[in-house]
Image: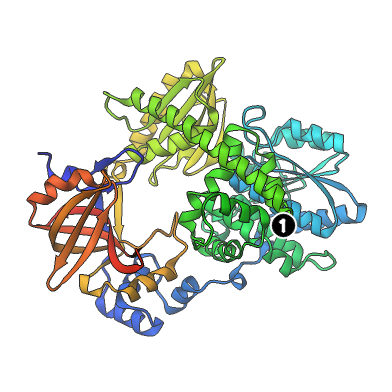
Amino acid sequence: MRPWHQLITRYASPVTVFMHSRWLINRTNPEYIRHLSRNASISPVMAQVLISRGFKTVSEIRDFLYPGATNLSDPFELPSMKTAVARIRTSLERKERVLVHGDYDVDGLTATAIMLQVLGVIGLDAFYFIPNRMLHGYGFHAPAVDMAKKLGARLIITVDCGVTSVDAVSYANTSGIDVIITDHHEPLRNQKPGMQKNGGMNTAEAQEFLLPDAAAVINPKLMSPGSKLSILSGAGVALKFAQALAMEEGVPFSNDDVLQLYDLAALGTLADVVPLTGMNRVILKEGLKSIQAGSRPGIKALQEVSGLNGKEMKAGRLSFTLVPRMNAAGRVADARDVVKLLLSEREEEAVELSSWLDRLNRERQQIEGEVYQEALEKLSGSDIPPAIVLAGEGWHQGVLGIVASRIAEEFYRPAFIFSIEDGIAKGSARSIPSFDICKGLTETGGLLLSFGGHRQAAGIKLNAADLRAFGKAIGGIVHASLDMSDLQPVLEIDANIRLSEITHGLVQEFSLLEPFGFGNPEPLTGAKALEVIGPRIVGERHLKLRLKKDNTSLDAIGFNMAGLLPELQEAAFTDAVFTPAVNDWNGNSYLQLVLKGLRPSV
């Protein structure tokens, strides 16, 4: 029998894998917990959860639990925003045609729809360009400038891309076309301080970053790292642009018009896995209300084809239904019509396009499964290195990011998955929280032809002949950057709890923490020395049992934990980490613990 410490924690992944995780819990002065509980009118358990997440005052707690659109910051805090708004006023005066350049993922598509809706409301003639993943690759390049020239557009606005597109902006400038860049990805850093001043930036900012010579560069990553705006998605930046126009006197755009955009911004924010705190929390909460109301025909049709009719629109539910369907077009086809869906006002058209996305998503699932299994086979029988680098001839480029995410999650290592065609390896990288993947890629010694992204994800291109050298280089960088504890999953426990404290009221109180997602996970609570009653396997892979302490016992479910049954049958008492929930079944409602980790009591 394997030791308990090797088996005890559920490690969520598409293939059932159990790993030893570190359990971490913040301990707080009980008197302080009682103080916040009393003054914020919340339970002591809720107070402990919020303290563990960095909220120390009553005002901070209330702002977090009850956010609203009035909590949005001033959009003119973003660099170049004033310059960009002024350029839009010029376009209005000149009655110019504008081209919006987006991206093929959900963040880029929703940002495109936001910008098109804004430009349409204020009366500008706007068109859009969505790159094809296979034909154009990621980012703003010459083909979009060529399209603008054919259209006679005098202004290009990028969304969710462009901050590194020095050559494309230069080409636009020489063609007499101005460019406004709105992006949230990492900019290039200047190798030589003071190299150039551009993008409407001040001298100090220009010295730090190598930016395209655009009319304006709006990107929160150009601000100080601690800025509250730095976590915005591409759709979030587009929403701030809309907010700025609504504040500009003489521009026919209002705050009511901004409110119509929250559903789009919410989907982009959710899909791009940015922290669901601060402004992103406001965007998502307001957007979910709009999505629930079904006011946008395209999103409503997507809900129907995803089987969501009559269900509450929660972040997690949308992440596994609407988001993958919207992403499917950019992965295995052409994403242009997703924008058409999002802006459609005709029910028949919305239903047709949603059904198309549903079919593409099934195709994507099949392709992804095949590439994922081939990737696992390449790993089988070998030690797992600090960084996992895998490549295959002809692997579909559209699913590499998903496969990289699954590999990184399963083995808890940064993963780099490449498709090789004509001697070139194009790939996607996904990281673990402790490793900044973009920073690591900058240290690979010139092996890459190109790359771009942010801390947890990146796109990469290099010569296939350099893959082995790249694997060795990035493995060394990860090894030097992290210690062994960084390569272990962590369960961050928000609060110790007694089973007797778990009530329907507590579960309802925890719902105030929603929407859950990256940066704001479901609350994890822990209890020690619990008696295990009747453990059994359900649905082949899941573990069902009751946990008891003193006079209280509760049902518990451990998804993908069936492998723990032999150990549980031999253990008298266990420590457990779980999320309290309510399970509605056959018209009945009862409390249930959703298990996240188990270990033997000491």
Which residue sits at x=62%, y=50%? 234
Q: Residue furthest front?
A: 586
What coloring was used for the rendering?
A: rainbow
431 left or right of 450 in image: left
Q: Mark 1 — residue?
A: 81
The foreground one among 497 and 56 is: 497
Q: Amino acid at mark 1?
A: Met
Q: Quarter of the image holding residue 284?
A: bottom right
- Dot 1: what SS? helix
Which residue sits at x=77%, y=47%? 215
Which residue sits at x=33%, y=68%? 588
The foreground one among 77 and 355 is: 355
Determine crowd level at label 1: few under 14, some 14-19, many 20+ residues with C-alpha closer than 10 A.
many
Residue 365 sits above or below residue 463 on the image = below
The foreground one among 219 and 361 is: 361
- Image quadrant for the C terminus? bottom left
Residue 461 sits above or below residue 519 on the image = above
Q: Is residue 442 visible?
A: no
Could you tell me residue 419's position as x and y percent? 50, 24
The foreground one among 194 and 32 is: 32
Could you tell me residue 402's position as x and y percent? 47, 37
Q: Is residue 514 visible?
A: yes
Residue 356 sits above or below residue 514 on the image = above
